[in-house]
Each structure stands twice: as structure tokens, then as C-alpha cells.
Amino acid sequence: MSDVLQRLAEVLEARKGADPESSYVAKLYAKGTDHMLKKIGEEATEAVLAAKAGDREQIVYETADLWFHTLVMLAVNDLGPDDVLRELDRRFGLSGLDEKASREDQR
């Protein structure tokens, strides 16, 4: 498996203190959480539309945008891809129905 997510997370962390005029990521940070979350919604919608159209190339492109903006959101919250991968690993081998029910029981 590629280490691209970890390398990207390191770049995103480094951009936290960068000048917003010199970095797209720094500009996202400067615009705040609401803007960043809106970007995730936009990218998710674009990925869904690409999938609906069956455009494989566009699906990959839009999913990359979605993952990228999600990684920025994680970084803002001092989280990274390893945190998500640990959760996915925890769920591996569990019935999705059982896992969902366990979360509902915790509410």
C-alpha cells in the first residue's frame, strides 16, 4: 500500500503556519472550518455525480479531491489518516450491522 496519505498528512501539517497567499492548503486553514466543511460537501457531491454518470476517470478525480479535503479537515482537528485507518482496522471482521448497532447502543 502506498504511503501517499501519510506523506500528504505531513505536508498538510507543515502548511498550518504557511502564508495563505503562498499555499492553497494554508488558504483553506485561514478561511476556517465552515469553508472547509463546505468544500468536503461539494467534493462529495461531485464524486456522487461522477459515479452516477459512470465516468470512471471523473470518479477517481473527484474522489481524490474528496479525500484531500477530508485530510485537511482531519489535520485541522489534529488527526490524520492513521487515526481513520485504526478505526477501519477495528471494524474489520465485524458485521457492519453489529458495528452500527453498537454505536447506537452508546448513545
Image (cartoon, rainbow, N blue to C red):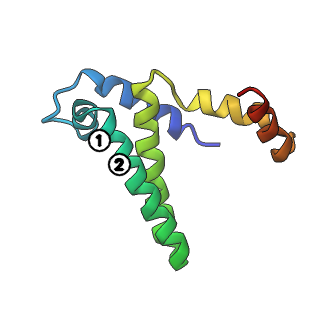
Task: Tell whether 94 sits left or right of 81.
Answer: right
Disc 2 residue type? Lys
Give the x, y percent position of residue 30. 22, 30
Front-lying residue, 28 or 102? 102
Q: Where 106 sits versus 42, above or below?
A: above
Question: Residue drawn at (29%, 41%), measured in percent from left and top?
Answer: 35
Disc 1 residue type? His
Q: Where 66 sits versus 75, above or below?
A: below
Give the x, y percent position of residue 95. 87, 44
Count of residue discs: 2
Tag shown at residue 67: none
| Mark 2: few/some/many CA within 10 Å (<14, 14-19, 20+) | some
Front-lying residue, 8 or 52? 52
Front-lying residue, 22 or 40? 40
Secondary structure at badge 1 equals helix
- Which residue corresponds to mark 1? 35
Distance between mark 2 and mark 1 Cα atoms:
6 Å
In which quadrant will I find the N terminus? top right
Give the x, y percent position of residue 94. 86, 39
Q: Kindly indicate whether the residue at mark 1 contacts the one at mark 2 (C-beta within 8 angstroms).
A: yes
- Which residue corresponds to mark 2? 39
In which quadrant will I find the C terminus? top right
